[in-house]
Each structure stands twice: as C-alpha cells, then as structure tokens.
Image (tube, rainbow, N blue to C red):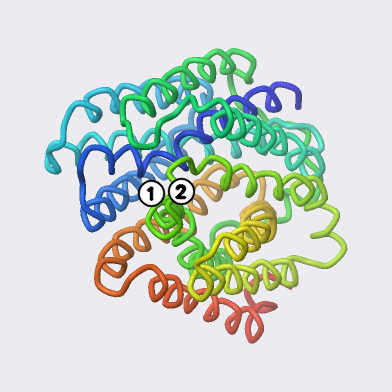
Amino acid sequence: MAAFVINYFFLFATAAVYFPYFQLFLKARGFSPSQLGVLMAFARLAGIIGPLLLGRLADRSGRFRRILAVCMPAFALALIPLNSTSSFFLSVPLVIVAGFSYHSIVPLTDALANRTMKEVEKNWGRARLFGTISFIIVSLLYRFAHLIDGESSSSILVNQLVLCILYAGTLFVLPRKAGSGDRSPRQDEGGGLGKTFWLGIGIIFLAALSASSHLSFLSLYLHEMLGISNVSGMWALCAVIELPVFFFAGPLIRRFGLRRMFLVSFFAIVVRLLLYALFPVRPAIIAAQLLHGITFALFYASAVRYVSRIAGFKRIGVGMTIFSALGNGLAVFIGSLAGGYIIEALGFQMFYAIYTLPALAAIVILITAGKRIGIP
C-alpha cells in the first residue's frame, strides 16, 4: 500500500495543475470557446482510446510500470510545442498526444493497485485518499503563493513540467510486474464483461455525461461568470470534501449497497448543476463545490467497486480501463464537444440546466432496473 500512497500523492499533484488549468492553458493561446470545446473533446477522445489500448497491453504483459513510465513523458513533451502555437490545426495532434497519455495514467494505476494491493477493498480508497490530500496541498500552494498566472500559458507549462518530473521519480516504487496480489473471494465472483457489465457502464456513462459539465467547463465558468482567474482555491475546496468520502466509501458501500450510493451521487449531480444554472453567485458556487465529495468521490468509488465485483479479478484490468474510457472518458468527450457550442449559443446557465438531463435519466433507469443489472 505504501508504494501506491507515494505514487497517488505525486500523480494527483500533476492533476492539481492539469484539471484546473489545462483549459485556461489553451485559452491563453487565443482559442474561442467553441475551439476550446473541440480541443478538449479531442483530448478526451484520445483519453478514451489510450486506456483501452494500453490497458489491454498492460493486462497481457503485466508491465504496468513500464507503460506508465512512457505515458507521463509523452504528456509533458506534447505541452512544450503546444505552448508555442496559436494554430488550431497544429494544436489538435498535440492535444491528442497529451490526452492519450495523461488520461491513461489513472486507470492503469487503479488497475495495478487492484491486482497487487493487499486487502484491496479496504486499502484502495485509503491509498487514493493521499491523491486527494496532494491535490489539496498543491492547489492551496498555487492559490496563496501565486505561482501560476492563469492568463499565461508559459506559467502553467513550467509548473506542470516540474510536477511531472517529480511524479516520474515515484514510478520506481511501484511493482515491476502485476501478479495476483492478495485478493478476497469476492473479487473472483465476477461474471466477466457480459450484458450486466455493459448495462451498468451505460448508467455510469449517463451520470458522467452530466458531471462532465463540471469537469470540462468549471474553470471557464468561474473566469467568465464570476471573474475568478486564480481557480485553484475552488478546486482545492472540491478536493477537501473528497477526503472523508474516500476514507469511508468502502464501509458506506458495504452498509447501504451500491444502488443507494449511486442514487445519492446521481441526485447530488443534478442539485450541483442546478446551483450553477440558477445561482451564478459566489455563495451558491461554494455550496455546489461542497457537493463534490458525493458527485465525484462517492460516485467514483462506487463505480470502481462495481467494476471490481462484476468483471472479477481476471478481467479487472480491462474492466477498469473500459470504465475509464467509455463510462467516463466517452461521456466527457461528448460533453466537451457539445458544451462549447451550447455555451456560445445559450450561455452557461442554460448549459448547466440542459446537462442535468442525463443524470435524471440514470436515476430513472437505476430505480426501475438496477437490481436486474447487478446493482442491488
């Protein structure tokens, strides 16, 4: 577990720059909202393909660490020329490389942890907790030390590269090759990637499609609607709320069941987006951020546990990358692709109102058919 604590800590240090600032990095190059939406969509499309290809390769070879050691440098090297161009067409392939490599890292790490970590049902959430702690620390550092200028792509680039180098050093502590680990009997009960698995991924996709509006456009929303250019504080607030949820996610899922935990997280997504849509003022946005522990941490932990139970140990590597690529990545791709045009045409408030609809559909399906698709 200690190796993954260290690795998650530095991995999510890089995320504390990537997720809040990547869109602002592109905006600083002079792209319009619709161009930003398309570029973010390309990044996410590459982030769908990357985990599927690399996850299968890692599952077959067991060499997760070697693949991770290629992903982060590829991401970092794509950012350097991206910082030197304002051409939309030249930026597309660079964004694709960045998305392909960066979005493969978390699912590969999760899959490696589930294959090698002892008492994974209890320890995975606690190891992942240190990623959230890192995200908070780094976000607050940027918030108060003013190390990043959100209007400068070069400022964002330098800080991202430094954190990527620090992360690369942690790869040496990870297992060289994924073995069987110390799995519990429940992990071997899965039925594989059959109809039940895919229906569950479909429900996760709908909720993630709604949640993509927060992930893809929150920084731009804060900048345009509230005049906030240093967005690290708001992202740090999200991460603080994750801490207790990740710590207690395992016991909560065992006590109340996956179906109830999914329903709670889906309802919270709807409420959060309505706050963005109806009340574009700082107090309401802070209230929306306080829901992040439910809309992200509980949702994510429940989805990981669902994949682990349904796919079973032998297919968990492929199952986890399918969840990341299709259940989450494809949702964010579609959400990003459409989102920029909706914002340009209707504004942020209508955009967030429209994006409540997929989560509402997921709630209806889960209530009516959850038990039949393996979500009791």
**1 and 2 marks in contact (CB < 8 Å):** no
Q: Which mark is residue 244?
A: none
- Vertical placement of 271 versus 56: above or below? below
Quarter of the figure with the N terminus: top right
What is the secondary structure assignment of the residue under circle 2? loop
Residue at 83% in and 59% down: 252
Q: Amino acid at mark 2?
A: Ile
Residue 120 spot, x, y in % from top left: 76, 39
Count residues near mark 2 (Cα–Cα under 10 Å), then give few for <14, some for 14-19, many for 20+: some
Residue at 60% in and 79% down: 363
Residue 191: quarter of image: bottom right
From the viewer's side, name the closer residue of 64 and 262: 262
Residue at 49% in and 28% down: 61
Judge whether residue 85 can be spotted in this image: yes
Does 280 sit left or right of 144 as displayed? left
Residue 216 spot, x, y in % from top left: 41, 54
- Vertical placement of 165 versus 360: above or below? above
Judge whether residue 310 can be spotted in this image: no
What is the secondary structure assignment of the residue under circle 1? helix
From the viewer's side, name the closer residue of 32 and 135: 32
Q: Which mark is residue 48?
A: 1
Count residues near mark 1 (Cα–Cα under 10 Å), then give few for <14, some for 14-19, many for 20+: many
Q: CA distance from mark 1 to mark 2?
A: 31 Å
Residue 224 spot, x, y in % from top left: 37, 56
Question: Label 2: which residue?
Answer: 228
Quarter of the figure with the C terminus: bottom right
Does 48 sit left or right of 186 as displayed? left
